[in-house]
Image (cartoon, helix red, strand yellow):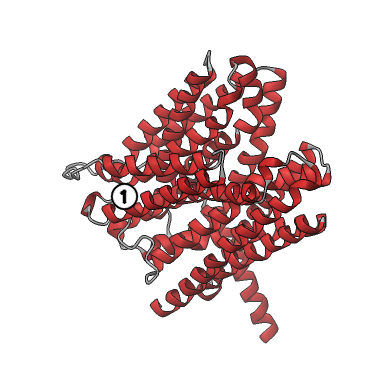
Amino acid sequence: MMDQRGEQAAATAGDELRAGWAELLEPRYALTTLMLCIGVALYAFNGFLVSTVLPSAVAELDGASLISWSLSLYLAASIVAGACAALLKMRYGARATLVCAAIIFLGGTLVAGTASDMPTMLGGRLLQGFGEGLVAALCYALIPDMFPERLVPKVFGVEAGVWAAAAFGGPVAAGLLTEHVSWRMAFHVNLPIILLFLALAVLIAPKRETGAAPQPLRLPGLRLIILSFALGAVMLAAIAGTISASAALIVASALAILLLIRIDRRAGASSILPTSAFSTSGLPGLTLWIVFLMAVAQATSSVYLVFALQNLFGFSPTLAGAIGALMAICWSVSAILVAHVSGVGQQRQTLWAGPMLQVVGLICILIGISGGWLAAIIAGQIFIGSGFGISWAFISQTSMMATPAAERDKTSALLPTLQSTGFAIGGALCGFAANAGGLAEQSSGDAVRQPLTLAFLAAVAWAIPAVAAGWRAMRRSSSRS
């Protein structure tokens, strides 16, 4: 009898799991899921596009000295746009804001793909970043609006798979187009995808309620200027000629961010951050700290792992890139595997288990680089990807659901924006650490081992507070229930 009941329970659980995934493909959710996945795919594809397309583009446009600004401007514009996405959604509705964002992105793609000089190309990338920053933030904000809570982890699981495919398969496709057709075609391939997203936004995205009084909108001009200054300072810190200049720019960026938070807390309804953002006493603030610190720590791998594999192990760009892509693959696989977890206690455990796996993974990579052990680096990539995969959906869901309904849009839209900000700041910090260790004076070979070791040691230092925040968030979540 007990065995029969166990078999029935297992069968029921399996049916619920299959039904949960299948529910995303039902008519009421299928097109919404497709729209959100396209938004994520466009963001990932165009963020990583530069590594494949730009070498050919700058050769034609004679802009080698400006190549690094293609990603920097895209990232900065996307962060600034994401910061005001919730306010625009509140004032104009999700549909109108998404349509305008898609049109801006479409225009940027056309400008970049038809550019005759590098400044025009950078202008296109700026427009792309602004449009896609709004798209990504709003796609996150729409998840709790358009899906029941039980499906949210599965939506994140699907998006994780799409993100990995776009981020690492997209550049391969872009490389083939660049090699066999033109680098311009790698931009233009976006056009039909953007048009499909635009059509879905018109059909599906909720518009502002008819008859509802429009919310007053005060554009956060001063705060966006301060944010732009902070981003500019931290990006310049990554390429500053001296350690002292880099340190001064990092400090200036940190002070600007603190000023931004202080001013925003006095802005009332027109604030761009939720009231509890970055508070260490509340669940929403703790989860935002986890998102930010994990991104800051992960930036070191994004910047230096492939470089280390090529210079310390002599790998080809393709093989080094494949090992670099292992993290995203593990992220996607683990996100899909845990998406069916419905036990509240198990979900809470991921709030600290994910950051802990990241710490373990970074320590493995640190050991692998300092000692020349490839197996440790591969293990580190698996640990890090799994850490992000098992925790990202539940961290995001906890952050969204713990925020008061009136501010949920701000928290949801902040998640991808905060992650991008963490990558930008982390990139500057790891560059500062590596250059302090002498990387700028070394070109290749074993001489880069010590500065790279120092950079990954700094990454571990940034990841450890995320574990502490995750543990505190888990305890706080338990006390709420």
The x and y percentages for residue 18 are 60, 59
Q: Is residue 323 left or right of residue 145?
A: right
Residue drawn where x is 30% and y is 60% of the image: 275
Q: Quadrant of the N terminus?
A: bottom right
Residue 381: which quarter of the image? bottom right
Q: Residue at x 54, y 27 (%)?
A: 190
Asked if 167 appears above or below 336 in the picture, the reply is above
Q: Residue furthest bottom?
A: 1
Counting from the top left corner in percent of width and height, residue 442 is at 73, 41
Identify the residue position indicated by label 1 in the image.
272
Residue nearest the viewer, comparing 464 with 438: 438
Q: Nearer the viewer, residue 268 or 258?
A: 258
Quarter of the figure with the C terminus: bottom left
Q: How many marks?
A: 1
Q: From this viewpoint, which residue is outermost toward the top?
A: 116
Question: In the rendered image, which quarter is residue 87 located in?
Answer: top left
Front-lying residue, 175 or 286: 286
x then y, percent, for residue 422: 50, 51
Which residue occupies 34% across, 56% down? 408
Where residue 38 appears, as percent x and y from the top left, is 52, 38
Label 1 crowd (10 A; few <14 / some 14-19 / many >=20): many
Residue type indicated by callout 1: Ile
Does the image show residue 150? no
Q: Looking at the image, is 135 positioned above or below residue 361?
A: above
* Left or right of residue 261, residue 79 in this image: right
Q: Secondary structure at mark 1?
A: loop
- Evaluate whether residue 203 shows in this view: yes
